Amino acid sequence: MSLRRLASNNGTDHDAYYDVTHLELQTGMLMTDPSAIVEQAPDALPHVDRGMSIGIATVITVVSAVLVAGSSYAVLKGTLSAGMTRLMAVLSLLSLVAASYGLIELALAVIATTTERRRKAREVTERRKGERARKTPH
């Protein structure tokens, strides 16, 4: 039996059932037989996207804050032309939005880092045996 035949689109469900039944007869192990179940590895936690790193979030926040401060100062100083003043005001508002985004991402990155450290510590604790094993309450 080939896996290609089972995976092909030109076969029928009947062909797939025949091939599985044929394989079961060859190996002598039925798919519903509990002894045919293969030992599986312990459940590994799925990969979780942790988002932005703390360093990148900090850089975004600091650069945006500097732009907000600089462009706000230029607007308040009032020595620029009307067009440049408006441009600096728009830059100040966009930088304020970027700074807010950076602060939110920074908070999420800190939470993700803390969560990852706790997960790794829990994995180490669960692997311990004997005297160092985790005590279960009775």
Image (tube, grey):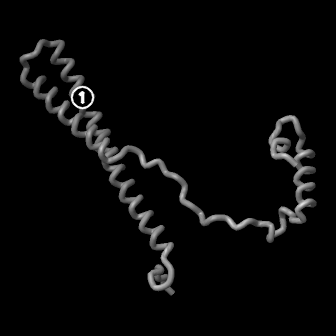
* Image side of residue 16 versus residue 137, left or right: right
* Image side of residue 95 versus residue 31, left or right: left
* Image side of residue 101 versus residue 8, left or right: left
Residue at the image position 27 percent from the left and 28 percent from the top: 94
- The picture places residue 128, in percent across and down from the top left corner, at 48, 76
- The picture places residue 31, in percent across and down from the top left corner, at 84, 62
- Name the amino acid type tagged 1: Leu
Count of numbered labels shown in the rendering = 1
Residue 138 or residue 9, whichever sits in front: 9
Would you place residue 2 above or below residue 138 in this image? above
Is disc 1 surrounded by few (<14), some (14 to 19) or many (20+) residues within 10 Å? some
Residue at the image position 18 percent from the left and 34 percent from the top: 66
Can you tell which quarter of the image residue 6 is in?
top right
Q: The residue tagged with tag 1: helix, strand or loop?
A: helix
Residue at the image position 20 percent from the left and 36 percent from the top: 65
Would you place residue 68 above or below residue 53 in this image? above
- The picture places residue 99, in percent across and down from the top left corner, at 26, 37
- The picture places residue 52, in percent across and down from the top left corner, at 38, 44
Residue 37 or residue 70, whichever sits in front: 37
Q: Which residue is mark 1?
A: 93
Residue at the image position 44 percent from the left and 81 percent from the top: 132
* Image side of residue 118 versus residue 7, left or right: left
Would you place residue 119 above or below residue 9 in this image? below
Can you tell which quarter of the image residue 40 is in?
bottom right
Residue 90 or residue 37, whichever sits in front: 37
